[in-house]
Image: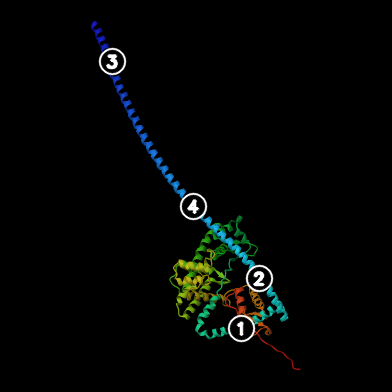
Amino acid sequence: MQSIIFLILGIVAGGGIGYLVLRTIDNSRVSGVKHQTIVMLQEATEAAERIKKERLTEGKDEIFRLRQDAEKDIRERRSELQRAERKIEQKEENLDRKLDRVSHREEDLRRRQEEVEQRGSEIEAVLKQQMTRLEEIAVMTREQAQEILLRKTEEEAQYVIGLRLKELEEKAKREADRRARDIIITAVQRCAVEHSSDATVSVVPLPTDDMKGRIIGREGRNIRAFETLTGVDLIVDDTPEAVTLSSFDPVRREIARLSLERLITDGRIHPARIEELIDKATRDVEEQIMEAGEAALLETGVKNMHTELIRTLGQLKFRFSYGQNALSHSLEVAHISGIIAAELGIDEELARRAGLLHDLGKAVDHQVEGPHALIGADLAKRFGERSEIISAVASHHDNVEPRNIYDVIVACADAISASRPGARRESLDAYIKRLEKLEELAQAFSGVSKAYAIQAGREVRVVVMPNNTDDGTVHKLAYDIARKIEEEMKYPGQIKVTVSREMRSTDYAK
C-alpha cells in the first residue's frame, strides 16, 4: 500500500517536474520569438525610414526639376511677350509716322484742291465770256451749235462706215474661194442655240369614265401604289375618258404609260397586279432602250461603244425637244457630221461618232445638275471615249471653247438639224410674237419707214426713207439691225436683213 502511495506520489512529482520543465522551455521559446519579432520590427522600421528618406529625396529632386522647367518656360514666355511688345511698339511707331505723313498729304491735297477750284472758277469765267462772244458772233446758242455739229458728224460717220462695210463685203467676196470652208463652218457654228424639253406629260385614254374610280381604288390604294412604284404623278381630273401621267423622267413616264395601258386592258387593278405589270413594263422598256441604242449604232456604223453609253443613247428615244425626237435628231446630226467631214477630207467615222453622242446628256439632265453638253462630255469621258469626242460633246453649245475641227463640225450639224424647216414645232403665239418682235426691232431705227418679216421670220425686209439716207447709210443700217437682232432675240439658224432705198417719182400727163 505504501509502495502504491509512493508510486503515485512519484508520478505526481514527476508530472509536476515535467510541467515545470515544459513551462520553462515554452517561456524560453516565447522569449525567442518576441526577440525575433522585435528585431524584425526594428529592421522593418529602419527599412521604412530608408525608403521614406529615398522617396523624399527623389520627390525633392523632382520638385526641383519641375521648378527649373517651369522657371525656364516662364522665362521663354516672358521673352516672347517682350518681343511681341517690342513689335507692337514698332508697329505703333510706324503707324504714327504713317498717320503723320497722311495728315501732311491731306493738308497738301486740300491746299492743291483749293488752288484747282480757284483756277477752275477762273477758267469757267473765261469760257463763259468766250462762249458769250461766240454766240454773239454766230447768232446761235451753244446747244444749237452742238446739235448741228453732232448731226453733221453723225451723217459723215454713217456715210464713211457704210462705205467701209461695202468695201469689206466686196473684199470678203473676192476671198470667198480661198476661205469658203472656214467661213461657212464658223457662220453655222454661231447659229447653234440652246433648247429645252417641252414634253413632261403623257395622256392615257380610258374606255369609260368608270375606269377612273377603279384606277383610284378603295381609299386611293391603287393610285398610291401606282405612283409609289413608278415615281410618276397620276393625275385624274375632269378630262373625259383620259388620265394624265406627269414626270420629268421620260423613261419612268414611258414605263408608267405602258403599265397603265396594260392594267386598263387587263381589267384586274389592285396593288399586287400593279406591281407585277410595272416590273414587266420596266423590263420591256429596258429592252426597247437597248434595242434603240444598238440600232442607232448600226445605222451610223459606229463600233466598240461601252454598254452603258448604248443604254443612255437609247433613252433619247423617249426624249423630245420642241417636238423633235432627241434620238432621231442625234442620228441626223451624226449623218450631217459625217458628210461635212467627208467634204473636208478628215475622219468621217469619228465625226459621226461625235455627232451621235453630242446630246447624250439630255438622257440624264433631269437627274444631274448642269448643262446637258457638259453632262454628256462627263459621261463620254467616264466610259472611255476619245478626247476629240469629249471635246465635241462639251463644246457644241459653246459651254467650252472649241479646240479642234470636230467641235465645229458637230456644232454646225446640230444647228442644221435643229433649224431646218419642219424639224421642230413652234406654237402659233410664239411664232407671231417672234415676227412682231423682228418688225419692231427694225422699225425702231431712225430713217426706217416700213419693215416686213417674211419667210417664217428668216428674213426681214426694211424700207428706208430716201431723203434721209444715202447708199453708205444703208449698209450701216443693215449691219446695225442684224447686230440688234443677235443681241435681243434667240432663234435657230440665221435671219437675213435686207435694207432697200428707192426713189420714186410720179407725174400725170394731161
Q: Residue type at mark 1? A: Val
CA gap, disc 3 to disc 1? 156 Å
First reached walking from the N terminus: tag 2 or tag 4? 4
Between the C-alphas of marks 2 and 4, the distance is: 52 Å
**Tag 4: residue type?**
Ala
- Name the residue beneath numbered marker 4: 84
Evaluate if marks 3 and 4 touch, with contact meaning CB atoms under 8 Å apart. Answer: no
Q: Nearer the viewer, mark 3 or mark 4?
A: 4
Q: Which residue is tagged 2?
A: 120
For residue 346, side relative to residue 195 (left or right): left
Q: Residue 160 bears which disc, if any?
A: 1
Disc 3, SS: helix
Which of the two marks, 1 or 4, is nearer to us in this view?
Answer: 4
241 vs 377, left or right, is right
User: Is residue 268 visible to us here?
Assistant: no
Split into 4 quadrants, where in the image is the C terminus? bottom right
Q: Which x, y percent locates residue 433?
A: 65, 74
Q: Are marks 3 and 2 in contact (CB under 8 Å)?
A: no
Task: Please identify the residue farthest to the right as the structure is shown.
Answer: 510
Name which residue lies at 50% across and 82% down.
Answer: 179
Residue 189 location (% of width, % of height): 53, 76
